[in-house]
Structure formats: C-alpha cells, structure tokens
Amino acid sequence: MKINRVILYFIILVWSVADLPALTFLDSTLALPEFRNVKWGSSLNDVEEKETAHYLQTFSGFGIEAISYGGNIAGLDARIDYTFKNKKLTEGSYTVILKDTFREDFLTLLSFLENRYSRPRYSSGPSYTSDSLWIKINDFGMSIGPSFYWVFKNGFIGLISEKFKEEITLTILFASDLTVNEYNSKNLVELKNFKIIRLNSKQNSTPTKNKF
C-alpha cells in the first residue's frame, strides 16, 4: 500500500508461452496466505506485537491506518506496509525502490513468487521482455509497467511495477477480500485502445508451504 500512490488502472492482458515458464496455475479455491504470519483481520496492535522488522512510521487518515517497517524480500531492501480498514488488516505489501536494475530485480521477485504460489493467473501492462516497459498515464511523470496477479478465493497477490519520473518501484501486494477486477476498478484511470482479456487455463497446482 502506498499512501500517496497516484490512482492507476491496470489492463489485464494475456501473455504468450514464451514470456513465462511452463508452470501450472494456482488453485484459486485456496485461501490467501497470511502476510508475514499475521492473520487477516488482525489489529494494528497485533502487528506491533509480532513484527520484528525495524519500525519506520505509522499513518492514519482517509479511512485507513497503516504501519511501515524496513526489511527485505528475496534479498532486496524493501519497505513493509500493513494497511487496516475498520481496524482490521486488509492489505500487506513489500515495496522495492530501484534505479537501473529493473529487469533483474523484477525477474528475481517473479521467480520468488512463482516458487511459492505457482504461475500467476493474470498479467497487466507491457511484457517484461518488451523494449518498451512503461505506459505513461499522466503528464506528471507517472507510468505503469509489467504486473502479475495470483488469485485466491478471498483475495490476490500482485507483483506491480510503477515509475514516477526516474524512480521505479516494485510492489508485492497482498490484498484480502478483494478481487483483481475490484482492485482495478477502484484504481481507475482510463487508458484507451487496450482490450481486457481473461486467461483461460486450468488451475491445478498447490503452493509450497514457504511463507514470507
């Protein structure tokens, strides 16, 4: 969760076989994994008691509360955010700020997630193998890049890339009780000439028990 995130619309696109390894899909009847071993619906106090990472800040406003920590994910430095609505944990995220290592770090995080949750269900934005990685969405320097989504029965995990001027961020977002379509509709900026396509493939794999 980014407190000052510019509102975005992620267009759902199908990817080619060449873009991703030949992995099976995660069974979307499985429950969304806990975020850092904290149960969905937990309070901010519950997180403060369990989290051992370095505390950064707390935020309250716009109907939400959030608490941030400094840590890492897959060997990359990251900000860890917990977001609460109605005093209950609804989102968790890791945000990595990059400069010149986008492809390498994007593939590191994609592989990290695939090893735990199998192949993503949806992709959005440009292909990460494309020469043109970014779609400009406004005149203030904001662009969106490749993103992937893993679907669960009560939420989803997203690997989301964004660029503001020269600053690139990669976010692993855990969203509880929210579908990908609902998330996108709440973050709507119209982008013309893109078609929404649902990927139709079997979902028959199970994730490893590794949690992070």
Image (cartoon, grey):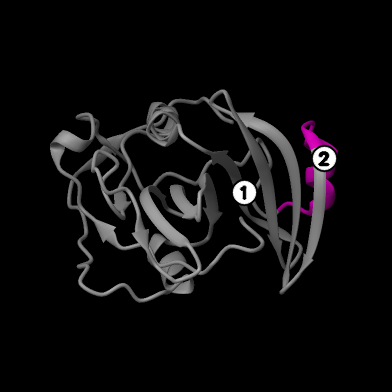
- The residue at the point 68 percent across, 56 percent down is 83
Question: Depth-wise, is mark 1 or mark 2 nearer the camera?
Answer: 2
Magenta stretch in the rendered image: 42-54
Q: Inspect the image, locate mark 2, and give the three-letter code of the amino acid beneath it.
A: Tyr
- The residue at the point 74 percent across, 47 percent down is 68
Badge number at residue 92: 1
- The residue at the point 20 percent across, 43 percent down is 202
Which of the two labelled residues, at mark 1 and mark 2, occupies the earlier sequence position? 2
Per the image, label 1 sits on a secondary structure element best described as strand
Q: Is residue 193 above or below residue 199?
A: below
Q: Percent from the top left, x then y, of residue 87?
A: 76, 63
Task: Please rate how many residues cluster around mark 2, counting C-alpha atoms within 10 Å: few if below 14, some from 14 to 19, many from 20.
Answer: some
Residue, disc 2: 55
Q: Quadrant of the C terminus?
A: top right
Q: Is residue 143 above or below residue 79?
A: below
Judge whether residue 34 is colored magenta.
Answer: no
Location of residue 86 by image quarter: bottom right
The mark tally for this picture is 2
Q: Percent from the top left, x then y, of residue 141?
A: 48, 63
Badge number at residue 110: none
Q: Percent from the top left, x then y, of residue 124?
A: 31, 54
**Seen in the image, is 187 located left or right of residue 58?**
left
